[in-house]
Image (cartoon, rainbow, N blue to C red):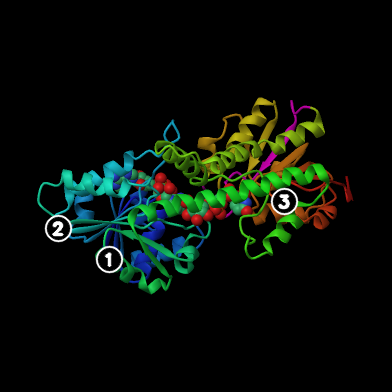
C-alpha cells in the first residue's frame, strides 16, 4: 500500500519505519527542512533503540521516503496518516493548531479519494472536525473517510511496542476504512479492536490518565511508607502480585514526566470541564505528581539545612531512560527549584544533554562524564534510571557525595553495599552501610 505520513516526531517516524518494514511504501512529510534532510540520509532526529537500523534498511530498499513538499508527498496516496504534535495551550487544553494546518495541507494537495488515519492524540470530536475541515477546504469533489487510530507506543521501546503491542485501536464511522487499515496492519500480528471514533479517541486519554493515576497512587503510598517505616518496593511488589492490580506502573519515584502524561491528563480534565464533568481522580493525579517533583529537594534540605553553594551532581535529565526526550521531564522543575535554592548544578545524561541545554536553566554546567559530574560533589540527585548511572554508582567505591535517588535504582540491600549515604523514595535512608 502507498502511504503518506504527516509529521515525523516519535509517532510519525516510528509508524513510517515500521509500516515500511512490513512491506508498505511510505512517504514521510515534515515541514522541518533540516530534519527532513537528515532523515533522508538515515540520520534519526530522535534517540530510539533499533530505529536507525530499520530506517536505513528501508531507505536503502526504496520503501521509505522523506519530503518537505506536501504536493509531492501526498500525490496518489489513498492512505494519509496525521501524526503532528498536539501540545498544550496556556489554558492546559490541547493545541490543535498543527492538526488544523495538516488538514488544510491535505485538502489543498489531494487529487483522489482518501482515508485519513489520525495517530495524534486528539480530544474527543477532533477526528470529525478534521474530516469537516478537509471537506470544506477541498477544491474538487472527493470522498474523504476518517479513522481514529491512537498510538500507544512508549519512547525507548517504540519499535518493540509497535511489533508486539497489546492491541491496535481503530475507530471509524463504518467498517470500510477500518477493514482496510486492519489489512495494512495484518503483518504485525497484533490484535485489532474496532470501535466508533469517539470511543477510540477517549480510549487514548483514559489509558494515559489511568497509567498516570497508578503512578500518583503509588507515589502517595510511598510518601506514607516513609512516615511509618514501611518499604514501598515491597508494598508495590505485594500489591502487583495480585493480578487484579498488576505489577506495571507501580514504580515509586519523583513523578511521571514526558511529552504526553502531563499534557494528556490536563487536556482530559479540560475536555471534561467542557461537558460539565469533574474528573476528581485525574485532578488529584496531576496535583500529586507536581508535588512529587519536590520530594528530593525537601529531603536534601532536611539533610543539609540549605543548599547555598553546594555542588550538586544532577544525574539523568531525560524523563525516562533510553530516550533523549527532555519534554516534560522532572529534571526541568527540579533544576529550577535547585537554582532558586542556590545550588551549583553540574549535570550529566548519557544522551539527553544536547536537548537539555536548550530547555534547562542557563546556570547549569554540563559534565563530559559521570566521573566529572561526581568529582567533589556534596550531593547527587539521580533523576533517571539509566543503566550507565546505576552501573557507575554500583562499581565505584565512593564515600561522597550523599546520594538522593529519585528512581529507587538500588534495592535497600544493594544500597547498603554502596558505601555512601543513600536516600530514596518511600524507604528508610541508608547511612554508609547501615539503616538510618
Ligand atoms: N511521543 C510519543 O511517544 C507519543 C506521542 N503521541 C501523540 O502523537 C502526536 C505526535 O507526537 P510526537 O511524535 O511526539 O510529535 P512531535 O511534536 O515531536 O513532532 C511532530 C512533527 O510534526 C511536524 N509537523 C507539524 N505540522 C506539520 C504539517 N502541517 N505537515 C507536516 N509535518 C508537520 C513537526 O515539524 C514535527 O516534526 C501527539 O499528539 C502526541 O500526543 C502518542 C503516543 C506516543
Ligand atoms: O501517549 C504517549 O505519549 C505515551 O505515554 C506513555 O509512554 P511514555 O511517556 O513514552 O513513557 P512511560 O514508560 O509510560 O513513562 C512515562 C513517565 O512515567 C514514569 N513512570 C512510569 C512507570 C512507573 O511505574 N513509574 C513512573 O514514575 C516514567 O519515569 C516517565 O517519566 C504511555 O506508556 C504510552 O502508552 C503512550 O503511548
Measured as percent of width and height from the top left, residue 243 is found at: 64, 65
Using the image, tell me which numbered label, if any, was put on residue 112. Answer: 2
**Residue 46 visible (yes or no):** no
Q: Mark 2, residues whose alpha carbon is within 10 Å: few (<14), some, or many (≥20)?
A: some
Comes first in the chain, label 1 or label 3: 1
Answer with left or right where residue 242 lies relative to residue 36: right
Q: Please determine whether, in this image, residue 108 is positioned above or below residue 345.
A: below
Label 1 sits on residue: 175
Comes first in the chain, label 3 or label 2: 2
Task: Spot the residue most to the right.
Answer: 434
Answer with left or right where residue 278 lies relative to residue 58: right
Instruction: Give the residue drawn at x 9%, y 50%.
Output: 140
- Looking at the rendered structure, the secondary structure element under dot 3 is loop
Q: Mark 1, residues whose alpha carbon is within 10 Å: few (<14), some, or many (≥20)?
A: some
Question: CA gap, disc 1 to disc 3?
Answer: 47 Å
Instruction: Give the residue drawn at x 53%, y 57%.
Output: 156
- Looking at the rendered structure, the secondary structure element under dot 1 is helix
Answer with left or right where residue 156 lies relative to residue 192: right
Using the image, tell me which numbered label, if any, was put on residue 4. Answer: none
Label 3 sits on residue: 408
Amino acid at each position: 500500500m502507498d502511504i503518506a505520513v504527516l509529521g515525523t516526531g516519535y509517532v510519525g517516524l516510528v509508524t513510517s519505519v515500521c509500516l515500511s518494514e512490513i512491506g508498505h511504501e511510505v512517504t514521510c512529510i515534515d515541514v522541518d527542512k533540516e530534519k527532513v534532510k537528515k532523515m533522508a540520509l538515515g540520520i534519526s532526529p530522535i534517540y530510539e533503540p533499533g530505529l536507525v537500523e530499520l530506517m536505513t534498511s528501508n531507505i536503502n530498499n526504496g520503501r521509505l521516503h522523506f519530503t518537505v513538499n506536501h504536493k509531492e508527498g501526498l500525490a496518489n496516496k489513498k492512505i494519509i496518516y496525521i501524526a503532528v504534535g498536539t501540545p498544550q495551550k496556556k489554558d492546559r487544553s490541547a493545541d490543535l493548531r498543527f492538526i488544523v494546518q495538516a488538514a488544510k495541507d491535505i485538502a489543498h494537495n489531494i487529487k483522489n479519494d482518501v482515508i485519513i488515519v489520525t495517530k495524534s492524540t486528539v480530544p474527543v470530536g477532533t477526528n470529525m472536525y478534521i474530516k469537516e475541515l478537509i471537506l470544506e477546504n477541498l477544491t474538487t469533489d472527493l470522498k474523504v473517510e476518517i479513522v481514529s487510530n491512537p498510538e500507544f507506543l512508549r519512547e525507548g521501546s517504540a519499535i518493540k511496542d509497535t511489533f508486539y503491542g497489546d492491541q491496535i485501536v481503530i475507530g471509524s464511522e463504518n467498517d470500510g476504512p477500518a477493514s482496510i487499515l486492519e489489512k495494512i496492519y495484518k503483518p504485525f500480528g497484533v490484535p485489532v479492536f474496532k470501535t466508533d471514533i469517539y470511543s477510540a479517541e477517549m480510549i487514548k486519554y483514559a489509558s494515559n490518565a489511568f497509567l498516570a493515576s497508578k503512578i500518583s497512587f503509588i507515589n502517595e503510598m510511598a510518601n506514607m511508607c516513609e512516615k511509618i517505616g514501611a518499604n514501598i518496593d515491597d508494598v508495590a511488589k505485594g500489591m502487583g502480585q495480585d493480578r487484579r492490580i498488576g505489577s506495571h506502573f507501580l514504580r515509586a519515584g519523583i513523578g511521571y514526566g514526558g511529552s504526553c502524561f502531563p499534557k494528556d491528563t490536563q487536556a482530559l480534565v479540560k475536555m471534561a470541564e467542557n461537558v460539565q464533568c469533574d474528573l476528581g481522580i485525574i485532578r488529584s493525579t496531576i496535583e500529586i505528581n507536581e508535588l512529587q517533583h519536590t520530594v528530593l529537594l525537601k529531603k536534601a534540605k532536611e539533610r543539609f539545612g540549605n543548599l547555598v553553594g553546594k555542588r550538586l551532581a544532577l544525574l539523568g535529565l531525560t524523563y525516562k531512560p533510553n530516550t533523549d526526550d527532555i519534554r516534560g521531564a522532572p529534571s526541568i522543575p527540579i533544576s529550577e527549584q535547585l537554582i532558586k535554592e542556590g545550588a551549583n548544578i553540574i549535570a550529566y545524561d548519557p544522551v539527553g544533554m544536547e536537548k537539555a541545554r536548550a530547555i534547562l536553566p542557563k546556570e547549569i554546567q554540563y559534565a563530559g562524564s559521570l566521573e566529572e559530574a561526581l568529582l567533589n560533589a556534596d550531593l547527587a540527585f539521580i533523576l533517571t534510571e539509566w543503566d550507565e548511572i546505576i552501573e557507575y554508582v554500583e562499581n565505584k567505591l565512593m564515600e561522597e557525595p550523599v546520594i538522593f535517588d529519585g528512581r529507587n535504582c538500588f534495592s535497600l540491600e544493594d544500597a547498603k553495599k554502596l558505601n555512601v549515604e543513600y536516600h530514596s523514595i518511600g524507604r528508610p535512608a541508608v547511612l554508609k552501610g547501615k539503616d538510618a
